[in-house]
Image (cartoon, coloured by chain):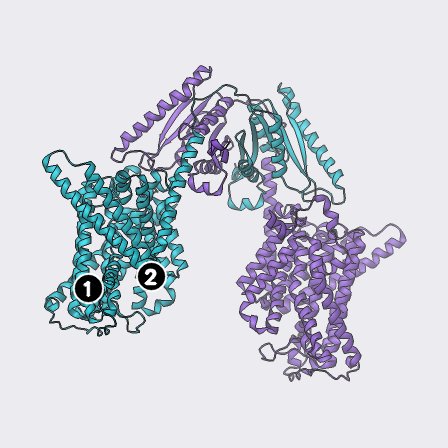
Chain colours: A cyan, B purple
Amino acid sequence: MPLIDKLLGRPLRSSEDSGEKIGVLAGVPIMGLDGLSSAAYGPEAALSVLIPLGLLGLNYITPITFLILALLCILYLSYRQTIAAYPTGGGSYTVAKENLGVKFGLLAGAALMLDYTLNVAVGISAGVGALVSAVPGLHTHILSLCLGFLGLITLINLRGVREAGMAFAFPTYLFAGSLGLVIVMGLLSGGLTGHVHPVVVPPSVLPATQAVTLWLLIRAFASGCTAMTGVEAVSNGVTAFAEPRVKNAQWTLTVIVGVLALLLAGIAVLCHGYHIDVMPEDDPRYQSVLSQMVGAVVGRGAFYFVTIGSVIAVVVLSANTSYAGFPRLCRLIAIDDYLPHSFALLGRRLVYSVGIVFLTGVAGILLVVFHGITDRLIPLFAVGAFLAFTLSQAGMVVHWLKNPGGTGKEKGLARVALTINAVGVVATGIALVVILVAKFAEGAWISILIIPALFALFLTIKRYYAQVARATHCPHPLDLSHNEPPVVVVPFGRWDVQTERALRFALRLSPDVIGVHVSVTADALPGTKDDQSDAQKLTAEEHDVTALWKREVETPAKAAGLRVPRLEVIPSPYRRVSKPMLEFINRVQIECGDRMVAVVIPELVETRWWELLLHNHLATTLKASLLVSGNHRIVVIDVPWYLTEDSLNPTSV
Amino acid sequence: MPLIDKLLGRPLRSSEDSGEKIGVLAGVPIMGLDGLSSAAYGPEAALSVLIPLGLLGLNYITPITFLILALLCILYLSYRQTIAAYPTGGGSYTVAKENLGVKFGLLAGAALMLDYTLNVAVGISAGVGALVSAVPGLHTHILSLCLGFLGLITLINLRGVREAGMAFAFPTYLFAGSLGLVIVMGLLSGGLTGHVHPVVVPPSVLPATQAVTLWLLIRAFASGCTAMTGVEAVSNGVTAFAEPRVKNAQWTLTVIVGVLALLLAGIAVLCHGYHIDVMPEDDPRYQSVLSQMVGAVVGRGAFYFVTIGSVIAVVVLSANTSYAGFPRLCRLIAIDDYLPHSFALLGRRLVYSVGIVFLTGVAGILLVVFHGITDRLIPLFAVGAFLAFTLSQAGMVVHWLKNPGGTGKEKGLARVALTINAVGVVATGIALVVILVAKFAEGAWISILIIPALFALFLTIKRYYAQVARATHCPHPLDLSHNEPPVVVVPFGRWDVQTERALRFALRLSPDVIGVHVSVTADALPGTKDDQSDAQKLTAEEHDVTALWKREVETPAKAAGLRVPRLEVIPSPYRRVSKPMLEFINRVQIECGDRMVAVVIPELVETRWWELLLHNHLATTLKASLLVSGNHRIVVIDVPWYLTEDSLNPTSV
């Protein structure tokens, strides 16, 4: 216990829940890391599509970025409204379910589950990739580093929401601060006017190999969008915030989206101004866009390394957003019976531990299967995110149609909100289609398989729970008629305290008691002679047991005026004990008609681990077999006897 | 089941035991592989000590070999007698125990267990070593090959004794036949006279670097002896033979020792005649003594490869002798309570599976730890073997002193036997001391630590079993006085068929029934609202459960004229179920004085594996916790309810 307390923190009372609530300062790192880390790879993703345009491509990056920012702005406004409308947590699942119907909710849920899961693997692997390209000596340890970071993030999240916020606050704010400072310095030293003097001159842009096409620009936009995931996290996790809950959540969303927008805009402008373009990754002098930009503005000093270090940290930790969103989403789905109920259980630190552990398991498998390099998964998760966005927006449109507001002012506000969400549906819907088409061959088609599969799984689980509820439903109060005593079977080996106790309990329970002894006819049992024939041995053993039964059981039962318990000796030619016992119990059950059969098992319980090695565990095996092969009419009664220090060393008492 | 049947063969009835008995033909490979394989490395081990003498060393190999053969002859005669005297299996353990006392028996047992275990690892690793030096391409797979052979030998032995005999017969007889043929050909073509014409000329012997000393000759003798282990196997396994048991065992021993003696003598004479000496292992042209000898006599043709192949096979399979001896030895020790009783259980194929699996486990660990190269373990196991030899001989001496024979002829025979065994004690005792002294620094000292440790373990286990027997001994017949009804506790979650059945059973058992509901006060439970305070939630849940209890339980109990069961609702601020339940049961136990407490647990049993994922297993956890933390006065009653296909889909009935 002390170890687990050290690792995970002491258990928290349910009533300590409010102490685990977060404010804006902790909310930004917990909910925002995924969104903010987009600044690190969104521009690079968009620019890499534009490589064939050469220098001309740089002219398009600013408009494309501003298109992306417009979409981000629509998402911001609409999620801000969602938070206010659903203060108990309004992820895409809830919003779509409540307004479009449960099937659309589940579709959004499946899409988001895919998105969150892939985000963990992709975030960690992207961060480790950046770290490895900065420190090439680590190249052979990619997978270990990935799994190490995964373990660390899991552990921090299992310790609770507040701890995660505190652990991740420093790198998040360092990232925003240092990158923001670089952008401001770059703009001041001529990034806006174009008369720049780079400290480290970026490599010259590759020559153009292709003319501008609309398709190329659309693909660049789609690639830029892939990084816009994670904006939904805040609206999904409103319940994690302290009161005033809605205000805190909205401010958190504002900070995240505001910082992200400023960073994206600044990076686009500086790339254009400093002529910074994506370098091919197979170039031995390869540097990321951000690395070139920071170098060009401030040179390769200590500040460069601090900034790039914080970028790497934020990309790795972007996986954490999934840990804020995924368990809460699964909990909501589980409460509605579409996922196993264990996803809804609060763990010792008041987080949904099953969801956290499950997420780590799946992400760990992905990392191992892809050897820690998961670039090819990126198109998959953008599909999930934008499908969820679109469904959530559509749900909000219906929400405003259903709640048009009573007073004039409310009506006006609702109409504005409706417009914003309607624009959102169209914008994210178009983006979804663009991503699907542009990224179809690169892997987006897999999402089209996985999301419906998850959807089908949800329905299957729901149907199963409904079946269980129907099967276990008891339509009447306690029925005490026909409550006859059961037939009691007591398996035993020899006459000892366990057997005595079991028989006492059995005779208390019912007048119909049968003692059963399985006769293992071989020299496997200590003490039997080798050169007797099987038949003789069985007879000898049978004879001994019968005499024992008469002496130790029948006589005292008669004396107490009880019905005399019956003895059965079962031969076991294959030296098994459980199987012939089960067969006998089945025979008894057939004989006794409607009555229950209670099997009273005398069990020797070892209290020290090494004692497990010294006993044969027939009682445990028998209990398990009875339970597995049993039926409604068999009851298993365990009469334990303990091998304690005292009972073993009576002199020490 | 079909898979395990294919792997291990169908289960055998105890009465099929006689069909599993072996004759001489199967006995030689099963019991003799360890002994016979000595021919492959005994001469090499002795010669390698003599390297510093150069050509002169070859003059000493014949006398040393004949000294070893004399010792082998004494061992043969004495074990032949032991077989006759102990037809139910007379290993060193039994002979020493019966004649010298149980402590000497255990000492011999510990020594043999060490010997057998190390023999598995050393035999396999030596064979694989030879294979790898013949096929250098396999060099990177040493450990995999070792573990592969280990697995194969284990599987064959788990299939039963007869199958092992059949599987190993071919390589054994091929080895004896081909090596015998080489020796005969070598002797005929001048090996006896010294006028030899080698087909492949062996490398010239290294020059002498040292003069002859007695110490060197003693060490050469000790090294030669290290290979003389395994002779004891037959006497230990007499019960494995078909009738006439003693004759079959004695003939098997005769064949093994006879073949071994002829091979050892032939090899010594040919080495001397052909000037074949050990080559340093670091020489790139390194060849074993046998390889040089076969090459010199018949050249490097097909026959060479057949012979050397059979040598490698026999060395690998020499590990099998341990599989014949070790499980039987452990069984004898377990029957006497000095090892866990599971070592005495006959498995599905009438072999002592636990011993086989245990031996494989330990040998596997040794192979993994030593990366498949276990040369350094050889001195350890010779100590074990010779300690066992000496104790067995000493036991036989006492046996003849106790049984001097009645008639004159018997007296004479007993006196001859006594003499043979007395010579045996002296010879093996001297060999033991020589080995201990000569090999002390090379690792024999470890045996001096391990054997007493095993000895101490035996005594501890015996003491434990005695304690258990005392603690569970029931000195009186069934005591039916004070057999009051127990206080019954029924934990439940909601009103369903499981709860109803459990309560019916509880009311049948005793008039004192308490229903217990653990109230988990958090939003972890589906359906509770988020924004109520804890206190309110508890009250609401408590209120619901109380109403349910009154309606479904109290009313019908009153109507049936029974005492009304009590309801307890326990709050659980840390959301645990088992722990507060256990605390409550402890309180009940204290309140109810001497009476038993029966806990009736309603359990939903899943019949399909994936259902395990969909339920929370509170019943299983509670049962396990009750058993672990329980005491003599708590009885656990499992009332199962089955989620069968029929109960889930009632329409399909």
Q: Position of residue B24 (x, y in %)?
A: 77, 58
Q: Position of residue B616 (x, y in %)?
A: 42, 39
Q: Which residue is mark 2?
A: A375
Q: Name the mark on residue A457.
A: none
Q: At x 30% / y 33%, what residue is drawn?
A: B528
Please give left or right for residue B154 compared with residue B176 in the image.
left
Which residue, as the protein is rendered here, is positioned at the far right? B408
| A5, A375: nearer the viewer | A375
Q: What residue is rendered at 36% in x and 24% in y?
A: B546
Residue that numbered label 1 is attached to: A61
Instruction: Determine the secondary structure under disc 2.
Output: helix
Q: Position of residue A45 (x, y in %)?
A: 26, 62
At label 1, which amino acid type do we have? Answer: Ile
For residue A277, say whether it is visible.
yes
Residue B170 as seen in the image, left or right of residue B284: right
Q: How many marks?
A: 2
